[in-house]
Image (cartoon, rainbow, N blue to C red):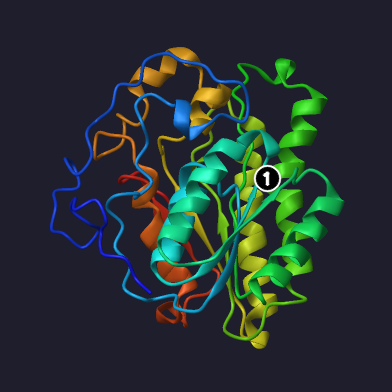
Amino acid sequence: MTSENPGGTPDQYTFQNPVTRFESITPPKQDQPEPGLDRDIEPEADRGETSYRGTGRLSGRKALITGADSGIGAAVAIAFAREGADVALSYLPEEEADAETIASLIEAAGRKAVRIPGDLKDPEYCIALVRQAAEELGGLDILVNNAGKQVAVESLEELSDEQLDHTFKTNIYSFFRVTREALKHLQPGSSIINTTSIQAYEPSPTLLDYASTKAAINNFTKGLAQQLAPKGIRVNAVAPGPIWTPLQVSDGQPKEALPEFGKSTPLGRAGQPTELAPAYVFLASPESSYVLGETLNVNGGMPAP
């Protein structure tokens, strides 16, 4: 089943000027406690709710997405469902309100939504997450490792061991643990997609721990792609630039930097989560059968390798 852009707004196939497809936002200074909610972000982020149009590219597929309640993960979940996939959503219990919204959009597309709250820092949850997703979906053939922790810290001296530990456990340890368990279910033709970042190439001085994990994800992706290629399982990554999500307002950026967020890109604006979704759909679909170990940069024109 596919969905014609339900809101009647221009979809991702409509010819548009990328500079003006979305407005150049000037977010007010704002703060949310971690992990942040899409429902409370100002201005509202676009996850493709009224614009993403599916064409059956993932018909019958079964996907697990971490960090699926908001931002990029939510946009990918909506797109996957409208392309015909059933989706299991991993998110923190505090994000239940956003997860309910995304689950309802998946179900409105005629697909199954499985909500599995928990903390990816917990190794036991990483295992239970995959097992429950595979059981309730009746298998698993797409894994999107997307969850991330990002908290800006002005100096290395202020970066606590606790934050360092939480960032690495969420952003890279969970990728190893969830993927390792998922390999018990993934068959030839399956796809693993990891979310990295422009921060892997152009690290901000206030995001040392976050940027380091994103560089590690690039390396993990390229090495695992070679390991799994003979098994017919493809591994790739997507590297977003400045995308407007709750991550930015829950201490992911210095508060004084929010009004200028994304304006330094060649396009002159921040990206919206829905602009990431087609990259994930491409890497999940058989169209990309000869693409392995690749990182697709979706960053508004910021130079990257």
| Residue 114 at x, y percent in the picture | 62, 59
Check disc 1 and report the residue beneath it. Answer: 171
Q: Within the image, what quadrant is residue 183 found in?
A: bottom right
Q: Nearer the viewer, residue 268 or 130?
A: 130
| Residue 168 at x, y percent in the picture | 74, 41
Q: Nearer the viewer, residue 292 or 96?
A: 96
Residue in view at x 37 percent, y 61 percent: 278
Residue in view at x 72 percent, y 15 percent: 158
| Residue 237 at x, y percent in the picture | 53, 60
| Residue 150 falls left or right of residue 197 | right
Residue in view at x 61 percent, y 75 percent: 141
Q: Secondary structure at mark 1?
A: helix
Q: Nearer the viewer, residue 15 or 88?
A: 88
Q: Vertical placement of 292 versus 80: above or below?
A: below
| Residue 125 falls left or right of residue 94 | right
Residue 137 is at least partly visible in this image = yes
Q: Nearer the viewer, residue 112 or 291?
A: 112
Residue type at numbered disc 1: Asn
Q: Vertical placement of 208 versus 91: above or below?
A: above
Q: Which quarter of the image is occupied by the N terminus?
A: bottom left
Residue count near mark 1 (Cα–Cα under 10 Å), binned few <14, some 14–19, many ≥20? many
| Residue 221 falls left or right of residue 185 | left
